Amino acid sequence: MQPSLIRRQLGGLVPPKVASPSLLSSGSGAGLSPLVNFYSKLPKGPAPASAASGIKGRFFNGKNASGAPFALLIAGIFGLGYTIDYQMHLKHHKNHAH
């Protein structure tokens, strides 16, 4: 792997360099203002609860919870299997007419 490719892939994992060693070792708190500004912009507290969307939100969560997706899945698998079996049966009898 190329070093630039690894650096690009890890770029999202490494936090931005806000504080430099010279700012931290100076001893005065004024040099840390970029660091304080960066962290003050981050959200505070627990993450907001996200509402589930799509099939999960429609059928499995809250007051609308039901087993309809499972019933439809079972019916769909049965219908697909029956169709394949019926088509195979017809192909078997096509050339063996009595």
Image: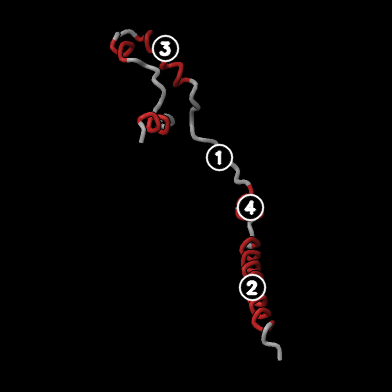
Q: Amino acid at mark 1?
A: Ala
Q: Earlier in the sequence, mark 1 or mark 3?
A: 3
Near-viewer residue (43 or 54): 54
Measured in 3D between alpha carbons, the distance from the residue under mark 1 to the one under mark 4, in whole angstroms, is 18 Å
Q: Nearer the viewer, mark 4 or mark 3?
A: 4
Q: Position of residue 79 (x, y in %)?
A: 66, 70
Q: Tell me the amino acid under the disc marked 3.
A: Ser
Disc nearest the viewer among 3 and 2: 2
Task: Please give left or right for residue 97 compared with residue 3 in the image.
Answer: right
**Any mark on residue 68, and which?**
none
Q: Name the residue tied to disc 2.
A: 84
Upstream in sequence: badge 4 or badge 3 = 3
Q: Can you identify the residue that label 4 sits on?
A: 55
To which residue does mark 3 refer? 33
Q: Measured from the top left, where is residue 76 in percent x and y? A: 65, 66
N-terminal-most mark, 1 or 4: 1
Check if mark 1's residue and mark 3's residue have beta carbons within 8 Å.
Answer: no
Q: Residues within 10 Å of mark 2 (few under 14, many from 20)?
A: few
Q: Give the crowd class for mark 1: few <14, some 14-19, many >=20 residues within 10 Å.
A: few
Locate residue 50 relative to residue 58 in the image: left or right: left
